[in-house]
Amino acid sequence: MISQQLREEIEAAVAGGAPGDPESLTYQIKPNADVGIIGVGGGIDVAGALAHGARSVYGVELNPATYRYAEEIYADYNGDLMDDPRVTLVNAEGRNALQAVDREFDVIQVIAIDTFAALSSGPYVLSENYLYTVEAFEDLFGRLKPDGILAYYRWLFMPPRETLRLSAVACEAWQRRGIDDCSQHIIVVGRDGWALSLFKQTPFTLGEVEKLNVQAAAMGLWVLHWPKIFPAAEQGQLEAGYYAAADPALIATSQAFTGLTTAYREGREAEFFASHQYNIAPTTDDSPFFFEYHRLNALGLPSFFGGHTGFLRSGNVGTTLFIIIAEATLLSLVAIFWPLWRYQRAGLRVPHAAAYSLYFAALGIGFMMIEIAVIQKAVLLLGNPLYALPVVLATLLVSAGVGSWVVARTGARVRRVTGPVGVLFLGLVALLIVGLTPLFRELLYLSFAQRVGVTVLVLAPLGLLMGMFFPTGLRAVGEEAAGFISWAWGINGCTLVYGSVVAILVAMAFSFNVTLAIGGGGLCRRVRGGVVVQPGAAGGGSSAGTGARRLGLRPGRGAGCLRRGLPWLQGHEHGPRHPPR
């Protein structure tokens, strides 16, 4: 939390012409600005903006506790900084807040809001952020004045990763907005593990570049990317002279930035991304894992046991994922199959046990993958996982309960649920894949209560349909092998846990839309079976065959494969229907 004494020291330094902090370099070319600050924290960025003569400061702070500290609890300590008539402080998520306010800014700052703190390291290494996506940059560019600047202050690693990826995100966003040559719009300066990236709506001018260079040198900073505003020969001569005595790692870093902007200008960005040591391709709202820049290995995990394990965001992510998926696999297999093997020695036989197991396992994994995907997508609209988690969970669980109640009241059969209802369910999933993220993005301007209402209205039909499959499956099992009902619950519960791990792996490797598609596709085979395969005629055929067809399964294929490999799962019509006591 900034103190009044530190505020006065900052004001005196700026008044005396001192260089100041690197993150304040923006004000050298944008003094007396209308400023938007995402992530106010203790208020030092607000104090810096006011010291440089900002006309107005619109500060956004996500953490309600931090907001109260700056606004109320430590108001005397910081000299009533937030009560300055030029300052407006709101407790909200950055994109939501800026979309909701009807104003434009000369400068929007996002200064080191994600560090190796409690919420972005250790057990939270897989955290994602919707301020580092192409769509976020589009939204923020839309809130800038015609020649405004978007400033990000991030870690500087060599070879470059996070900072280089920021430039890739900006170039991609500009390309969507019709700007094909981003090389003139970017300047990056840095030192000692940090870098300031400035993304300007219009090309930087010669005067602005000269001023930034002079101030950067006074601060002991290196220019890592020069805006390409000079003729090619002159630009090359300027940069060659500038880096003549530079460290080779610094030169390589500068070359990486130049390579990126050149690739975008020439339409070779995909080739550049493939050739770079790290995954620095632009992140999107559908795959917002900005900090996961390690490439996937043969196991589909990011840099498994790879280098740089000294950092919390590094190969440790791959190790963590591998350990979780290995544990989940082992425990699921032991919990499901070991007891079955034990009971079969005592004479347990359940008709088509493999088919039933596959059905309830698919429901568990599919339900969880869909749930994880829509929770993540709701974070974009609601602004915080602490809000998205309870709202989405409550909506899905309550509506799923209603769906189960409807099945109980109507006495719906499995074929009816896996047929017409299943087709409707898959259609809804497809609609969510195509339209959910764009819809949420368009509604960021709504109030929080309205955004919660939209979330409930959009997701309740999904939960209603999802809740119909499990009870109808239990009914079919109960007609044929009542002793397997408790086992169906156990299989479903086990695969729910397993599905949560698989959902994150799929999202990181591909996207949350792919996660949603696979989750919905978990019922695809059952839907096809329920529509194509007709139930046996009354009184004809075995009860086992009829029961399997009611589930919409084809025991001769998927289930038969398991039976050949695991003979103790083989159906036996004359065996006991209940586990031995």
Image (cartoon, rainbow, N blue to C red):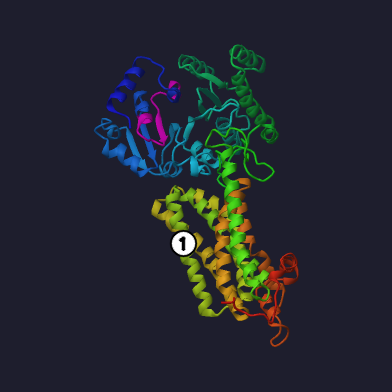
In the image, residue 144 lies at what x, y percent? 47, 34
The quadrant of the image that shows the C terminus is bottom right
- Residue underneath mark 1: 395
Q: Quadrant of residue 14?
A: top left
Answer left or right for 74 relative to 270. left
The quadrant of the image that shows the N terminus is top left
Answer left or right for 334 relative to 274. left
What residue appears at the point 60 percent right and 24 percent down from the top-left corner?
253
The single residue placed furthest to the left in the displayed view is 76
Q: Quadrant of residue 160?
A: top right
In the image, residue 102 lies at what x, y percent? 41, 41
Indicate the secondary structure of the residue bearing disc 1.
helix
Answer left or right for 434 relative to 442. right
Q: Is residue 413 visible?
A: no
- Based on the picture, tell me whether residue 318 belongs to the magenta stretch: no
Image: magenta residue range: 26-46
Look at the picture and state if 347 lies above or below 444.
below
The single residue placed furthest to the front in the displayed view is 346
Few, some or many C-alpha atoms within 10 Å of disc 1 (few <14, some 14-19, many ≥20)? many
Going by the numbered disc 1, the residue's amino acid type is Thr
